Image (cartoon, rainbow, N blue to C red):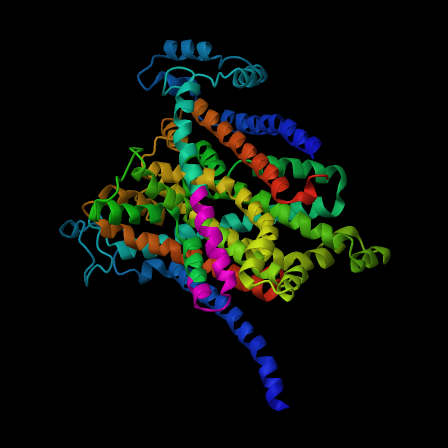
Amino acid sequence: MLRFLAFRIALIPLVALGVVTILFVIFKSVPGDQASIVAGATATQAEIENIRTMLGLDRPLTEQYVKHIVGLLSGDFGYSSTFRTNPLPNIMERVPATLLLMLSSIVVMTAVGLPAGVASAAFQNRWPDYLISSVVVALLAVPNFWLGMILIAVLSVQLGWLPSFGLTGALSLIMPTLALSARLIALVARMTRGVVIEEMRKDYARTARAKGLDRRTTLTRHVLRNAMIPIVTVVGLQAGFLLGGSVVVERLFAWPGIGDLLLTGISVRDYNLVQGITVLFVVGFLLINLIVEVLYTIINPRLRHG
Amino acid sequence: MADAAISAAEPKKRRSARRNVYLTTGSSLLALFVVLAVFGGAVAPYDPNAQDLMAILDPPSASHWFGADQVGRDILSRIIVGTRATLSIALTSVAVAGVIGVALGVVSGYFGGFIDRAITVVMDLLLTVPNMVLAIAVVSVVGASAAGLTVAITVSFVPPLARLVRGRVMELRDEDFISAARTLGIRQPRILVRHVLPNAVSVIVIELSLLAGQAVLVASALGFLGLGVQPPDPEWGSMLGTAREYLTTAPHLVIAPGLAITLLVFAFNMLGDGLRDRFDPNTSP
């Protein structure tokens, strides 16, 4: 198991390198001259050439690529036209807000989705199940930014209970978290319901019931433990959705995170900024997958000696 | 005796009725959207770009069912005409991603070896970029437009499809009927097209209809961010992007576009669930 983990950790820089290479190719094929974008609309030809030399854009592509990789490794994300320097400190400054939003969404997703799924399974084909399943179906179809806007319209504009934008305290976390986690709550609830129903039919669950254990204890002590494995998989797979969804939700709520910064970078065509944040997203995604992998071994003892 | 037979048949009958509910709800809703996409201009009560300065930000009324927007355009008409943009982005990206993903998955799963490893590595790399982020990166390069959006969504859908098809084909490859076909001397391409693919079709179709729902969500999210279909063409996501600026003064702008997106995603989800229940009941959630 330790060897497997070491292998997974060693793989992260390799995968990151692959993705960075793909991104480099994509961004180098952008139509339009990066030097003149940085120089601005009023720059003279001489100024543009100056900037081109300064940024190393006149060098051969292979040299630029090597410099780019070496730069990333030493924390130099290149020249950002937004910040007029290496954007890394400005990006890192915004990471905590994004992490906060993601963590609170994961907590809400688990705290609401899991019990809802178990309840749905326990009351299979009775009214609580129908009620929960209908809500799940609805949540899977609602776009998160629309849900967010409705929340703002009702809770901020109409009732004045919650701040509608920014990170200004615990209250300001509520609506972005709800918008981001809605779909995930539904996915976890649906998955949990399916797995729990399936596990309840298995021999070990029937044995536990035959032994005289009541339904509740069978469910919590035996079935849930086995059901956790597929559920954690689903949660892990949704990490990417969480990262992507946070971009939209951050923009809607003017949340001071890196998703919002990414969109700013795109609107002013600051490719080094966009590239840097994308790389950060990918590394974050890989780390989340690693954590899911570790969680597996904690939940599933069978894997520990594998 | 007869009674016992009937009661035994009862639950089975009820279950198939439930399956039909998913399928019929999904496909009839989708049919409605297709009709709107094709005949949108004729069905819409107003020209979607006609500005009525007397109606600016009017709340819903008998003449404007969903109200009018910030320049007095009829929202219902813009929703109806906007169906085409969203639906064609979703269907095109899913179709193209379907062809590429299935081809890669079949080749990768059936032949194995070096080709398999090469394809799998690239797909795994692409899978590590969240699809929203990948879509945003592609759009920032190819430009914000319906075409750019379609390319972006297509790129992000190929890896999950290729992975799914690869898994299914690898299961099939070792089945007896495939080795029988091989023993009979049937050529590889024919085996792939006539024997392997038909057995993977249900899995693929189910996945495609669920992906179409996701395509609608991603397309409208990018439209909302201003990275999709450009104004003045009506598109649901960008209508919501504008509505955001009028949340305090005209909250009614928010309702219709969001409902339209939700209903279309719901239609695709129902279709996918219905198909899964009918053709692949083992994996039903």
Q: Nearer the viewer, residue A71 or B90?
A: A71
Which residue of the protein is positioned furthest toward the bottom in this rendering?
B1
Q: Nearer the viewer, residue A80 or A126?
A: A126
Which residue of the protein is positioned furthest toward the left in this rendering?
B54
Residue positioned 42% across, 42% down in the render: A105
Q: Is residue A2 above or below residue A220?
A: above
Instruction: Give residue B139's position: percent from left, percent from top.
Output: 44, 36
Q: Is residue A86 above or below residue A141?
A: above
Quadrant hosting residue B284: bottom right
Residue positioned 39% across, 27% down in the render: A94
Q: Is residue A125 magenta?
A: yes
Quadrant hosting residue B146: top left
Regarding residue B20, the answer to whether it shows in the image is yes
Q: Is residue A92 above or below residue B146?
A: above
Instruction: Give residue A274's position: percent from left, percent from top.
Output: 44, 27
| Relative horizontal placement of residue B46, taking residue A105 as reference (left or right) | left
Regarding residue B235, the answer to whether it shows in the image is no
Q: Quadrant of the C terminus of chain B?
A: bottom right
Q: Nearer the viewer, residue B49 or B125?
A: B125
Instruction: Give residue A75's position: percent from left, percent from top.
Output: 50, 17
Q: Is residue A21 above or below residue A227?
A: above
Q: Is residue A29 magenta?
A: no
What's drawn in magenta, residue-wise?
A107-131
| Relative horizontal placement of residue B279, taking residue A183 as reference (left or right) | right
Residue positioned 38% across, 53% down in the render: B261
Report the magenta stretch's main SS. Answer: helix
Which residue of the protein is positioned furthest toward the front in this rendering?
A212
| Relative horizontal placement of residue B271, taking residue B181 as reference (left or right) | left
